[in-house]
Image (spheres, rainbow, N blue to C red):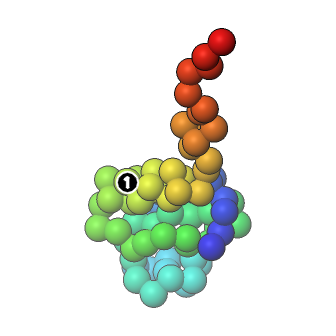
Amino acid sequence: MDNSTDLTAVRVPDDEVDLYSVSEGGWYAIGDDEKAVLGPFESLGECDRAIRERVSLVAPSDLSSFEGPQVH
């Protein structure tokens, strides 16, 4: 699994699928190397949600390092 969190939502038209090496047009999450990482999605909203879910799975959560209140 690619650990990159730098994804951008891109609408790939049917006549440009070969540029992104995908099999059909739609919304895709594209990485820095301009390759499709997630998709296709019907809408920008679906693609955006998938990107946010991916980022939350890949990026360490701020809460994971929280140790709770310190008792002195």
Q: Going by the picture, which residue comes out furthest to the top?
A: 72
What residue do we see at 56% from left, 21% from top?
69
**Can residue 53 be seen here?**
yes
**Can residue 13 be seen here?**
no
Looking at the image, residue 52 lies above or below residue 64: below
Q: Going by the picture, which residue comes out furthest to the bottom?
A: 23
Q: Is residue 28 left or right of residue 70?
A: left
What residue do we see at 63% from left, 38% from top?
65
Please identify the quadrant where the N terminus is shown. bottom right
Q: Which structural element holds mark 1?
A: helix
What residue do we see at 32% from left, 59% from top?
46
Identify the residue under disc 1: 49
Image location of residue 72, percent across then percent down: 65, 12
Q: Nearer the viewer, residue 42 or 51?
A: 51
Image location of residue 55, percent across then percent down: 54, 53
Q: Would you identify the image quadrant in which residue 15 lies? A: bottom left
Residue type marked 1: Arg
Looking at the image, residue 64 lies above or below residue 21: above
What residue do we see at 60% from left, 32% from top?
67
Q: Residues within 10 Å of mark 1 (few under 14, many from 20)?
A: few
Q: Would you identify the image quadrant in which residue 13 lies? A: bottom left
Looking at the image, residue 55 lies above or below residue 12: above
